[in-house]
Amino acid sequence: MKFGDEVFVDDYNVDRMLVGDCDKDGTIEILAIAQQREYYPCALLKVDARSGLLLDEYWSPGCIVGIAARDLDGDGITEIFVAGQNNGYDRASLAVLDPRFISGYAAAPPNYQPVDVAPAAEQYYIRFQLSNLAQFVKGKRNVVGNLVTQPDGTMLIWVSEPAKETEYSLMYYFDSSMRCARVDAHDEFVKFHKRLEAESKLKRVLDAQYFEELRRGVEYWDGEKFVNEPVMNKRYAEAVKKPLASR
């Protein structure tokens, strides 16, 4: 694979998989993360479980930490959630894919776009801003590290700032339209933030306004640009409208 001017050898690990009939076409597929040994780039592969034939591949300009499956809108199609980070933007990222359209590459600046690959048609592609703890931890990027479905149907997304021996996590709660309803902080995040406040290293305090600004800072890729409202990728809307025979 070639991303911009950078060429990568075919040296990948496959360490996470989902198996099932996510697109309800009567056949079983394997969805697997292929991760470059240097953690970038990564791909989500869709493989026919019976024949082993590679059906599609979705490329990420950064690491993919995990995948999860959930019927987001109750239409019988199980959406695929792809969690990780985007090196092109130095941000945590989350893709929501219709399993019928797992192909192309995620949003990225030109030097992080794979050559001879078309843009993807994610249902949603979301990136998360860095918290004000970012300057005090080892990494320059935050990362989506975990996804949990809540009893009330909301999706809890853990976005972390990795540190040397731990990580400081924010918790983003999304509804079925992928609107971010609220943001909260894990105990370790709160304790570290309070300590930095006490040491006069941070002037900003943790209050309702702080979390509201993080909530409003969630960005969605509309197919051309990132916006601060829960919109689908317009390429997905176009793909869904196409007759089945033309796909």
Image (spheres, rainbow, N blue to C red):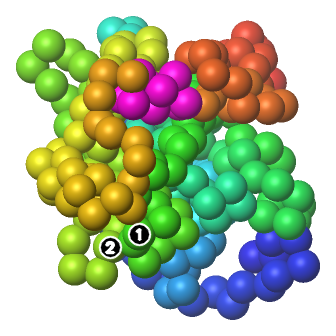
- Which quadrant is the N terminus positioned in? bottom right
The amino acid at mark 1 is Phe
Q: Determine if residue 30 is in view.
A: no
Q: What residue is shown at x 62% (from left), y 28% (from top)?
A: 220
Q: Earlier in the sequence, mark 1 or mark 2?
A: 1
Residue on which the image places disc 1: 136
Dot 1 surroundings within 10 Å: few (below 14), some, or many (20 or more)? few
Residue 128 x %, y % = 51, 42
Q: Nearer the viewer, residue 158 or 123?
A: 158
Q: What residue is shown at x 45% (from left), y 32% (from top)?
A: 214
Q: Is residue 69 left or right of residue 90?
A: left
Q: Does 212 appear in magenta?
A: yes
Residue 157 x %, y % = 31, 38
Position of residue 24 relative to residue 192, above or below, is above
Q: Determine if residue 202 is in view.
A: yes
Q: Is residue 134 left or right of residue 196?
A: right
Stretch in magenta: 210-218
Dot 2 surroundings within 10 Å: few (below 14), some, or many (20 or more)? some
- Label 1 SS: helix
Residue 25 x %, y % = 44, 27
Circles 1 and 2 in contact, beta carbons < 8 Å: yes
Q: Nearer the viewer, residue 236 or 50?
A: 236
Q: Does 241 appear in magenta?
A: no
The amino acid at mark 2 is Ala
Q: CA distance from mark 1 to mark 2?
A: 8 Å
Residue 58 x %, y % = 62, 52
Q: What residue is shown at x 14% (from left), y 13% (from top)?
A: 152
Q: Nearer the viewer, residue 181 or 100?
A: 181
Q: What residue is shown at x 79% (from left), y 44% (from top)?
A: 119
Residue on which the image places disc 2: 163
